[in-house]
Amino acid sequence: MERRQASFKLGSTSGWRWKCCLGISLALASLPRGGLAFAMEALVRAIRDRKSSPEQVSAAAAKLRDEHLLEEPGDYRYVLNALTKRTAWQDALGIWDEMRWIGSELEELDFLYAMGAFARGKHWQEAVEIFSEMLGNRPPHLSLGRHRESLQADVRGYTAAIKSCKGAGAWQVAVQILQDMEDVAVTPDVMTYNTVMSACEKGRDYDAAERVMSEMCRWAVPPDRVTYGTLISACGWGQQWQRAIAYLRILAHEGGNACLFKNHTSSSGGSLFQFLLLLSTGRLRLDSGRAQQSYFDHDVYACTAAASEHLVN
């Protein structure tokens, strides 16, 4: 115990990490086959430990992969999810590649975790390709694993594919996936609609976000606070200050439904600059009660953008 503490104090942090990796390698080499399960559990704990540095997480993942310590599909799935949550997306994709290389029977969750890893790395095209493969629209290579028979995507799979498009603002692809859900009779939920709407906002397309809102109303899906916040943010790109104010007022009143206010522009009189003054002084916040600060920030931005446009014209 004393020697262990002394070795920890000696040398730099990077040297200590190198010694840890070397110690893991030597320990694994000396383990009998029955002890590999214990070694795997120790490495998985290192991945999940919040105190582990990114280098330590990568070292543990590399050891699991290089030593082929994962055997059961559930073990691969567990590690793939843990690495994705730790934002170690490259290491997660390394585990995904090994799953396919050894011919593991892939479940829907495996595809979801892999799409999440690609999305973390901002590789949304690859995530969509994996989703297309899961649907059977893109035949996999024989060396890239096998699927469980009659594998079908549910609302989680479609939402995960849409989410991968959101970060890049690829709203056209996100909207197309939403339309595909209707074709195969998979019912979107509010999270799905919010994710598509967020992709439209990231793509700075206010009209597209409003069309998604219309779809929600058509299918009687109740909007939530995230829906309103996303719409308010999208109003900034479209210089739609009056609609931003209207959505903010709907958000401020419990039980408000934007579907009932589609043609509503402003709930009270006044000019653009008067509304901006109300927002900046906090008077509108006193009337709103529960609205979050971020939504007011989006509204201020929408009004400011519209004011700039108004002054130019």
Image (cartoon, rainbow, N blue to C red):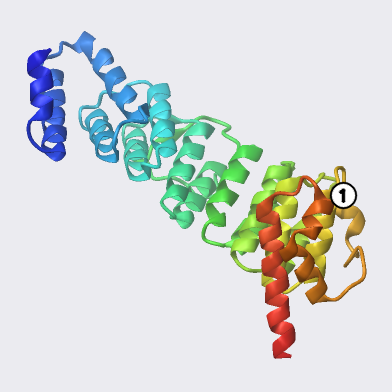
Q: Which part of the image, by quadrant, shows the C terminus?
A: bottom right
Task: Confirm whether residue 180 shows in the render.
Answer: no
On the image, the x and y values in percent for residue 286 come to: 81, 52
Q: Nearer the viewer, residue 184 or 84?
A: 84
56 sits to left or right of 153: left
Q: How many marks?
A: 1
On the image, the x and y values in percent for residue 98 come to: 31, 35
On the image, the x and y values in percent for residue 299 come to: 72, 63
**Can you tell which quarter of the image residue 295 is in?**
bottom right
Q: Residue at x 33, y 24 (%)?
A: 44
Where is mark 1, residue-wise?
257
Q: Residue at x 53, y 34 (%)?
A: 108
Position of residue 6 relative to residue 304, above or below, is above
Residue type at numbered disc 1: Asn
Q: Nearer the viewer, residue 308 or 154?
A: 308
Q: Residue at x 79, y 65 (%)?
A: 278
Position of residue 307 relative to residue 85, above or below, is below
Q: Residue furthest bottom?
A: 313
On the image, the x and y values in percent for residue 12 come to: 11, 38
5 sits to left or right of 291: left
Q: Residue at x 13, y 32 (%)?
A: 16
Q: Which part of the image, by quadrant, shows the N terminus?
A: top left
241 sits to left or right of 121: right
Give the structural element (helix, strand or loop) at label 1: loop
Position of residue 14 relative to residue 273, above or below, is above
